[in-house]
Amino acid sequence: PWKYFLRQVMWAGLGTVAMGVAYRLRLTYLSTIARVLPFIGVAMMLLPFTPGVGRSVNGARAWLVVGPFNVQPAEFMKLFLIIYGADLLTRREKQLADWREGMWPFLKVVMAAILIAVVQSDIGSCVVIGAIGLSVLFLAGAPMRPLVGMSVISGVLGILYVMTDGTKLARFTSFLDIMGTREGDGYQVYQGWISISNGGLTGTGIGAGTGKWGYVPLAHSDFIFSIVAEE
């Protein structure tokens, strides 16, 4: 019963140490390593395709098995993109209006990461990596017109990609008929509804909810909201 609690405590402890180290890092040091981070990130994202090391979770070949842990390299790539983009775009601040000199070098790295995530069938990472890329460009002061254009194009390509795969399309559209899909693609959302309704306005009390006992899939991660709402 304490498995996830102890695991969370461990990661919180490691995260606290990492936060302290990051806080004390000089920006000059980050700037020095920033240029190699994209290469490290891309190499890490390719590792899940290595037999014996990579692992598929929920249809996405995007995980590495490291001892008793599953690690998703895309999470590191997200951080690397922020550091790399901040360094590159700061150095090219006066060239941002020039598509080729200002934005394109950074966008190439973002697109490479998105392409690998697509091959991995990791739609979540595709969306987040794209959002990080656009956000970094926006904060750097890139012109709005190309940013809006890229957002529209990315959205259209994303929709077309989802429509080509019946399984992914069903996941995106199952909410339109929850009762009709409650035994299949809408099962998770339906069970989440039940948990939230069980809690009423005041909740069942901390620890007293029943949705987490095998009813709501991924109750400890992706769908923890429904459990918090219930209790």
Image (cartoon, grey):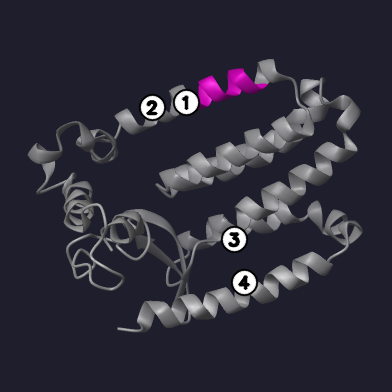
What is the spatial separation of the Cα atoms under label 4 and label 2, in whole angstroms?
35 Å
Residue at left offset 42%, top offset 48%: 122
Q: Amino acid type of disc 1?
A: Gly
Which numbered disc flags the more N-terminal residue, 3 or 1? 3
Which residue was labeled with disc 1? 155
Q: Does the image show residue 114? A: yes
Nearest to viewer (mark 3 / mark 1): 1
Q: Does the image show residue 42? A: no
What is the spatial separation of the Cα atoms under label 3 and label 1, in whole angstroms?
26 Å
Contact between labelled residues 1 and 3, with CB atoms less than 8 Å apart: no
Contact between labelled residues 4 and 3, with CB atoms less than 8 Å apart: no
Q: Secondary structure at mark 2?
A: helix
Q: Position of residue 147 (x, y in %)?
A: 65, 23
Question: Horizontal placement of 144 versus 214: left or right?
Answer: right
Which residue was labeled with disc 2? 159
Quadrant holding the N terminus: bottom left
Neighbourhood count class around disc 4 (C-alpha, 10 Å): few under 14, some 14–19, many 20 upward: few
Give the farthest residue toward the top: 145
Q: Amino acid type of disc 4?
A: Gly
Which numbered disc flags the more N-terminal residue, 3 or 4? 4
Q: Is residue 62 above or below residue 208?
A: above
Q: Which residues are magenta?
A: 147-154
Contact between labelled residues 2 and 1, with CB atoms less than 8 Å apart: yes
Which residue was labeled with disc 3? 44
Q: Secondary structure at mark 3?
A: helix
